[in-house]
Amino acid sequence: MPLKVLIAGAGIGGPALAFWLSRIGCTTTIIERSPSLRTTGQQLDFFGQGLPIIRMMGIEDDLRAISVKEPGARFVDYTGKSKAYFPASHSISITTQLEVMRGDVVDILYKKTKDLKGVDYVFGNHIKDLFQDAEKVHVTFANGAKESYDMVVGADGIGSPTRKMMLGPSFPDPRFDLGVHLAYFTAPTQDGDPKDWTICHVPGGKAIMTRKDSDQNIRVYLGARGGCEHIDAAQTLEERKAAWALLFKDTVGAQAERFMRALQESPEADDLYDQHLTQIRLPEGCWSKGRVVLIGDAAHCPTPVGRGGGTTSALIGAYLLAGELSKQLKENASNLECGHIEKAAKEYERLLRPSVWEKQNIGTQMFNIFFPQTSWGISWLHFAGWLIAKWPYSIASRSEESSKLLFPDYFGLSSAAES
């Protein structure tokens, strides 16, 4: 009998895992709480080992065909004058050479997997409860249906309900707050809007950032370190818009007046999404429990902005988990008991955890530096950025970086990864 798997979440990690599980003959159901694909969101970047993974999946050309042509990242002052520039090829640039809108990535992964043998999508439903015994994971759904599975995978994001059910109500909160609030929304573009990722620092530990992925829209990011209690208290969309506008009221320059007006008046800004910048830091061995496994942000949200941390880690995790399951299937004559699934899950964690911790280990101090409180601090940051951008040792092309798969080649596709 094929392994019967339930995946909670149809974002990035869930469909990627379904792709690989199809190759080893699993019967996989992806259940998504939303009634349809959630295709909103900002730019995602692909970096490091994410590149050989998407090559092996056969979606690199699709992603590059619709990628955002973002030349690089730029510090600007409140008048718009450039203070430091990091092209996408720069070794520390926060923009990469493959940037794609989240909705486009989700759509590509869905189209790649929806017709695969053994893969089924269910929208508008979610897991209400689960428990496991030696034989199965028994799931109760929100619509009242009940079903049993050989394995359940939580790919349902930072707030993962699957994680809470797996670990139990007494487990310590694994969220690690980085001390920064971030908001994203869309505004109408204007002539002269730059294609670079622009970062304008504002005294008081704040920043206004823009990214342009189309001729019609510009994506605005608002960041703030501290002083955001009124934002936490806001509930409705209009209250949240007003709270962010109040935070940036009286900001000099930085196109603040334009963007705050767009936030409150433009229908495009109804896509406002805001969050505490948060990592998920689960103790070693807690990415899984028996037949229930977590992947992506549900297990280890590594880096909330830049460098492809979350996207890349989700893709690698999906590949490693499926690969380790394939090893267990081969070693146990396709008869996986709970111990075999648990062994595969622990090995997936062992292989991926070091790179996740490397991304997570940026600490709050980095954000303290990135969001200066004073004008003097902003000037110092701009000068330091200019020095780093000009320093020859730091310039290294990313085009060939990590083109070779550094993890086990479970499916004999390493030649595709290096093409």
Image: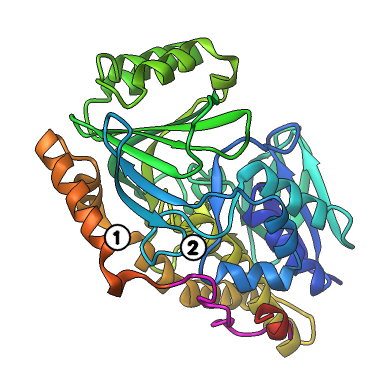
Label 1 CA crowd tier, 10 Å (few <14, some 14–19, many 20+): many
Q: Position of residue 156 (x, y in %)?
A: 59, 47
Q: Quadrant of the C terminus?
A: bottom right
Q: What residue is pinned by disc 2?
A: 287
* Coloration of the structure image: rainbow
Q: Secondary structure at mark 1?
A: helix
Q: Which mark is residue 194?
A: none
- Residue 374 in sight: no
Residue at 54 percent across and 38 percent down: it is 212
Question: Which contiguous range is marked in magenta?
Answer: 397-412
Q: Position of residue 162 (x, y in %)?
A: 57, 48
Residue at 14 percent across and 47 percent down: it is 380
- Residue 147 in sight: yes
Q: Secondary structure at mark 2?
A: loop
Marks 1 and 2, how far apart at CA: 38 Å
Residue at 72 percent across and 55 percent down: it is 65
Instruction: Tell me the kind of residue under disc 2.
Output: Trp
Label 2 CA crowd tier, 10 Å (few <14, some 14–19, many 20+): many
Q: What residue is pinned by disc 1?
A: 389
Q: Is residue 242 above or below residue 170?
A: above
